[in-house]
Amino acid sequence: MPLERFFGRRAVGIVGNQSMKLSTKLGPSFFSRSLYFATNPTSIESKTLSSDPVEIPPEKMKSLDEMQDNEHYELMFATKSGLPIPKLPISHSAIAFKDPETETFFVYGRQSPWDFSNWLREGINFRTEMDNEGKYLNKNYPFTAHPTGALFTKEEIEEFLNKTDKLINKPQFCNMVNSNCYSASTTIMGLAVETLVKRQKFDAEEISKVLKVLEEHPLQDHFSLGVMNNPVVQSTLKSAISSVQERVTAIKKPNAAEQELQQQTEDLLKALGHEGIETLIRDCLSI
C-alpha cells in the first residue's frame, strides 16, 4: 500500500478542511469513508465569530478560572500534533472555547496517561481528566481550532467538562484505541448539541454547523477510534442527534435550513448505526 494512502487525510488524526456534498460511503478501506454535509453558513455575524479554522496563539490560551460568568464563548473542536514531532500524522484533540471580545481561548482536553513527561512532574498516574491544555503545550506545536458558531456560558461549559469526566475519563482507561482524547472531546460536542436543542429558540443553522464540524473531524480523524468504537460516545451522539431530529421533524412548516437539518440528522443517525465496531474492524483490516 502506498505511503501516501496510509498517511492521507483519513490516516490517524490527520485533519483537512475540504468541503464536499454528502457522501456517506465505505470504500476498500476506512480512509474512503466520508461524512460531509452541505449546510448553510451560520447566521451569526462573522465579524464577531470565526468562520475558518484558526491557529490558537499559545499566549492567548487561558484558564477556565479567568472566564467571566456573564459572557458567552464559542465552541470549537481543536487539534494539534500528538507529539512534538514535525509532520507527525497523529493528532491530539481537545475542546476550545473562544471569547469573541478578547480573542482569547480556553482549551481543555483529556491528557494521555502515557505522557512520561507528566510522570516526571507529577509522578506515575494513569487517571485522566479534562484539564487546561496550556499547562502541557509545546508552543512550537499549537492547536488549530475549527469553529462552530455556537455560544455557551461558563456554567454550561463547566457542566460539559464535569459530565465528560464522569462519563469518559473516570470510568474508562485511556488505552488510545477504544478510549482516547477524541472520546472526551467528541462527548463534549454531543453534550453541546443536547444543550442547543433544549434552548427555547431553535436555531437550525447553528446546530447544523456544530454537526458539520462533528462530521468533518471526530468522525473522520483517527479512523474514528475512540468514537465509533466507544459505546458511551456512540450513545451520547445518538441521543443528541435523535433529540435534534425529534424537534426539527415536529416543525409543521420547516424552512430550508430546518429541512436540511432534518436530512442531516437522518444521514448521521444512519451512519452512526451502520458504522459501529464491526464496520470499524472490517475496514481497518482491509487497509
Image (cartoon, rainbow, N blue to C red):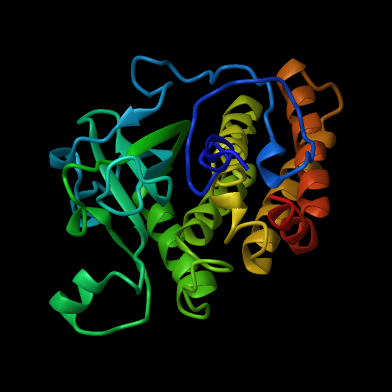
Q: Nearer the viewer, residue 74 or 57?
A: 57
Q: Is residue 198 left or right of residue 29?
A: left
Relative height, residue 220 to residue 134 (above, below): above
Determine the residue located farthest toward the front in the rendered image. 1
| Residue at (53, 40) in percent of width and height | 3
- Is 26 placed above or below 64 here? above
Q: Residue at x 77, y 57 (%)?
A: 282
Tell me where residue 195 appears, x and y as whole percent.
57, 49
Which residue is at 15% across, 77% downward?
Answer: 120
Q: Look at the picture and state if 129 lies above or below 127.
A: above
Residue at the far right in the pictured view: 252
Q: Nearer the viewer, residue 126 or 47?
A: 126
Q: Position of residue 6 (x, y in %)?
A: 56, 43
Residue 279, quarter of picture: bottom right
Vertical relation: 172 (above or below) 30:
below
Residue under the point 67% across and 57% down: 228
Could you say which is closer to the camera, residue 50 or residue 122?
122
Q: Quadrant of residue 123?
A: bottom left
Q: How many marks?
A: 0
* Residue farthest bottom in this picture: 124
Q: Which quarter of the rendering shows the N terminus? A: top right
Residue 259 drawn at (x, y percent): 79, 23
Report whether 266 appears left or right of 159.
right
Horizontal and vertical percent position of residue 183: 53, 60
